[in-house]
Image (spheres, rainbow, N blue to C red):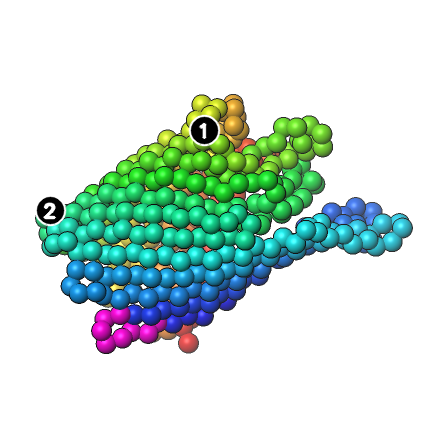
Amino acid sequence: MTVGGKIPFKNGSRLSGAVAHERLENVSQQDVVESPQIDQQRTAIIALSRAEVQWDFPVGEMHLLTWGAVVGEETLKQEQVRDEAAGITSVQEITSGAKRENIETYLQDDIFLSDCFELLPGIRYQNDSDFGSFVAPKLNLMFKPAAFVNFRIGYGKGYRVPNLRERFFFFDHSALGYRIIGNPDLQPEESDSFQLGLEMWRGKTVHGEISLFYNRIKNLIDTRLNPEKSLATGLQIFDYQNVTRAVTEGAEFSGRFLFWRYFTFKAGYTYLWAKDTDLDKWLPQRPRHQVKAGLDFGQSDWGTNIIIRAVYQSKEFVDTQNIVTSPAWTTFDLKLNQSTGEHTTLFIGVDNITDKHRDPNRSEFDDFRPNTPRFIYAGIRIKL
């Protein structure tokens, strides 16, 4: 649940704020078919609360200052209930108060140096109840050499503390051969990020963007197979671990082209180079290539809208030693919307036309292709 609002002022400033609360409940059960009762049930409840305020105010003609503050709280409770011959037993699996509070404040100045140059420095202060304080600066510059071109360059310091799920959560799917457990010894993740970007357009007909990025990461928080715990239990045991040093770099290309009045073609390509530099291995679950494309047809006079989507993703490594790979895959989706009146729309579609999906004989941690096979649907949408 989120509640928020904005208040504009005559001097051009604006005050905005929001309050949000989220409650997530996860229930897993283990049951022996021959027994009438549920033999084991584990219930985890994660509660997230957050309040934020932001004030944007101009200073003269060259500066737009932004100040903001965030206060948050996160709690995690997890209980296991067993129904055994000796009776029902209840165990609180997280006994040492899984709770964290955080306070953040930030300040940035959007400086309009000229019609062609815009500078955006900023700084963020964070204080976490479990990990203390951290200061993260950033600096971005935009250069506009022509009316239809934007060039951007930027640097930012990143910082993320592990959440309670990553530190304490116990997800038991032993019946399917695996468990995911938290790691209370996780350390915060730090990064230095550099970006270059070029944006060009021609009216509403053509639009394109190219961006290059480089991230140097310390203590990257990642999910990995734990060989020792797996060998001891006979299951696949995954836990959250810190990757001491990692580097991710690559490029993103995207474009949009409007043609023949009713057609819009959109496409994007991402190249990712991601390595654990300590092991000199590729980071798992990070495909090198990804392509997304779409073609839209819209004819408002007919009330017709046709959407075609395609996604390609290259193979990716499953394990840290780069031995097992998840296959490459391509999917196509098609959807037709047809207005039949002022308040009604008929729709029909097919997701994953080529029926590319995960092999049911492989673990979901060995095969990262889509979970859902071909799906055909139809219906009517009514607006009251």
What x and y, as percent, mark residue 231? 69, 28
Disc 1: which residue: 276
Q: Which SS type dominates the magenta stretch?
A: loop
What residue appears at the point 45 percent right and 29 percent down from the top-left corner?
276
Residue 170 point in image, percent of width and height:
65, 45
Whether residue 278 appears in this view of the structure is: yes
The 10 Å Cα crowd at callout 1, few under 14, some 14 to 19, many 20 or more, is some
Q: Amino acid at mark 1?
A: Asp
Q: Which three-letter amino acid code belongs to the residue tagged 2?
A: Pro
Image quarter where the C terminus lies is: bottom left
Magenta stretch, residue numbers: 6-13
Mark found first going from the N terminus, 2 or 1: 2
Asked whether residue 334 is drawn in magenta, I would say no
**For the residues marked 2 and 1, what is the alpha-carbon distance in whole angstroms?**
38 Å
* Disc 2 target residue: 145
Q: Position of residue 289 (x, y in %)?
A: 36, 34
